[in-house]
Image: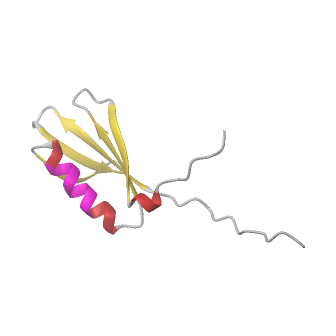
Amino acid sequence: MAKKRTKKTKPQKLDRVDITYRTRKGGWVAKSNGKKVDSATTKADLVAKVAKTGKASKGTTVRIHSRSGQIQEERTYPSSANPRSSKG
């Protein structure tokens, strides 16, 4: 009996949103492709806004930076769009 070939799908290109702190204006800003998407005074409010819009889209990766600029956390919305882990 011959094995069934499974069709390999091309990995989905996810939109990326970076949440960073603005030192001059003292607030948090979300940027995608270098353009401002949203802003808020607290990080938690901005993460909630971006998560809501990310869940409604095809796939979004959100990079949450600390005040110093280092990546603190990375999330994928919706979670079904998260890339599969590879062997090895």
Q: Which sits in the foreground, 86 or 67?
A: 86
Residue 20 figure quarter: top left
Q: Main secondary structure of the magenta part?
A: helix
Q: Which sits in the foreground, 88 or 39?
A: 88
- Write the residue at 45% across / 62% down: 80
When the figure is inspected, residue 76 is found, relative to residue 28, above or below; the finding is below
In the image, residue 57 lies at what x, y percent?
36, 67
- Write the residue at 90% across / 73% down: 1
Q: Give the farthest residue toward the top.
A: 68
The image's colouring method is secondary structure
Numbered disc total: 0
| Residue 36 magenta-highlighted | no
Magenta-drawn segment? 45-52
- Write the residue at 51% across / 58% down: 13
> From the image, which quarter does the C terminus lie in?
top right
- Write the residue at 10% across / 37% down: 25
